[in-house]
Image (cartoon, rainbow, N blue to C red):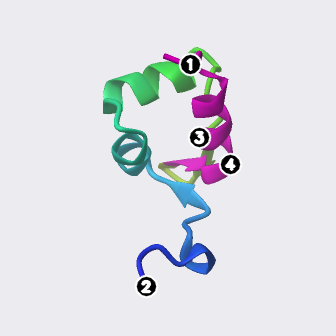
Amino acid sequence: MPNDPRRQKLAYSVQEAAEVASISVSLIRQLIRDNKLPARRQGSKILILHSDLLLYLESLPEA
């Protein structure tokens, strides 16, 4: 069940966040650097919470 909400990922790698949001990896990294997208670190891995990615996307102006 790929769309099962119980299986929703809690956090994404930079690459996964870019894929899910349909934006580039470099933009994700820039947003993190500019403190526009919160990120967490687990060892050497950068994680973006699903909820933070959703909040960022919802903050964008409507087209």
Q: Which residues are magenta?
A: 46-63
**Do the CB atoms of the residues marked 1 and 3 lie less than 8 Å apart?**
no
| Marking on residue 1 | 2
In magenta segment, residue 28 = no
Q: Mark 4 is on which residue type? A: Ser
| Marking on residue 50 | none
Identify whether 63 is placed above or below 57.
above
- How far across and how far down the image is residue 12, in percent? 49, 54
Give the class, few, some or many, for how many residues have Cα within 10 Å of label 3's Cα (few <14, many ≥20).
many
Please name the residue that numbered disc 4 is placed on.
51
| Marking on residue 62 | 1
State the residue at coordinates (43%, 85%): 1
- How far across and how far down the image is residue 40, in percent? 64, 44
> Is residue 52 rendered to the left or right of residue 44?
right
Please name the residue that numbered disc 3 is placed on.
53
Identify whether 47 is placed above or below 11.
above
